[in-house]
């Protein structure tokens, strides 16, 4: 099993998308990329922790490749909006790929360059690509939020 970590706005929708991907063993919604140890949702939403809402993806590389995960990541959000996805605004909703090794870093950078060259977006891609640091699972009520939900939003 291998691990990948992505931030693409509210973690509810991101987690739901990766949960549907064959080869993904499990996902965890949480917080990463900041400086506060063991933050709460309220802390992260306050915008002072530096953390992004993110999803840690555990996957079987014999069933799904990291490139496939990257493809899904790019499709499920707008990588050209700085610190924002839809109505959710703040650095906690930034677009980011947190790589776990040099191979993931190389693939993430290459996929970003390829998307930039594609001309798909008129604006610059602002996705952060950074080393994975400590990952703090979100509160239980955030895990797999959309299972059985018909609507919702990421707001306090």
Image (cartoon, rainbow, N blue to C red):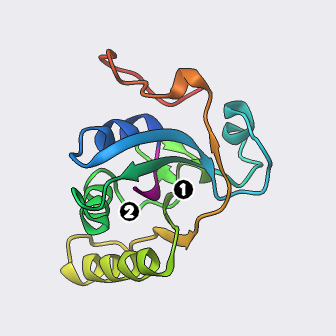
Query: Looking at the figure, which quarter contains the N terminus?
Result: bottom left
Q: Along the horizontal axis of the image, is 106 left or right of 133?
A: left
User: In front here: 137 or 128?
Assistant: 137
Span of residues in magenta = 1-9
Q: Crowdedness of circle 2 by 10 Å Cα count: few (<14), some, many (20+)? A: many
Query: Is residue 82 positioned above or below 23 on the image?
Result: below
What residue is rendered at 75% in x and 49% in y? 49
Residue placed under numbered mark 1 in the picture: 83
What residue is rendered at 68% in x and 55% in y? 134
Q: Is residue 73 visible?
A: yes
Q: Along the horizontal axis of the image, is 93 left or right of 70?
A: right
Name the image quarter holding residue 21: top left
Mark 2 → mark 1, Cα distance in angstroms: 10 Å
Query: Looking at the figure, which quarter contains the C terminus?
Result: top right
Query: Is residue 96 positioned above or below 87 on the image?
Result: below
Q: Crowdedness of circle 1 by 10 Å Cα count: few (<14), some, many (20+)? A: many
What residue is rendered at 33% in x and 57% in y? 73
Q: Is residue 87 visible?
A: no
The local secondary structure at tag 1 comes to: loop
What residue is rendered at 33% in x and 35% in y? 16
Instruction: Count the labels in the image.
Output: 2
Main SS class of the magenta portion in the image: strand
x, y (%) of residue 35? 78, 57
Name the image quarter holding residue 149: top left
Residue placed under numbered mark 2 in the picture: 79
x, y (%) of residue 12? 43, 34
């Amino acid at each position: 099993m291998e691990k990948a970590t992505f931030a693409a706005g509210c973690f509810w929708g991101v987690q739901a998308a990766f949960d549907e991907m064959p080869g993904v063993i499990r996902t965890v919604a949480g917080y990463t990329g900041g400086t506060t140890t063991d933050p709460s949702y309220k802390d992260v939403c306050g915008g002072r922790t530096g953390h992004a809402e993110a999803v840690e993806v555990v996957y079987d590389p014999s069933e799904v490749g990291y490139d496939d995960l990257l493809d899904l990541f790019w499709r499920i959000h707008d990588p050209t909006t700085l610190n924002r996805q839809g109505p959710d605004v703040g650095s906690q909703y930034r677009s980011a790929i947190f790589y776990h090794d040099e191979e993931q870093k190389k693939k993430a950078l290459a996929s970003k360059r390829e998307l930039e060259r594609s001309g798909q977006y008129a604006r610059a891609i602002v996705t952060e690509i950074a080393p994975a640091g400590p990952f703090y699972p979100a509160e239980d009520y955030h895990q797999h939020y959309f299972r059985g939900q018909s609507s919702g939003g990421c707001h306090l």
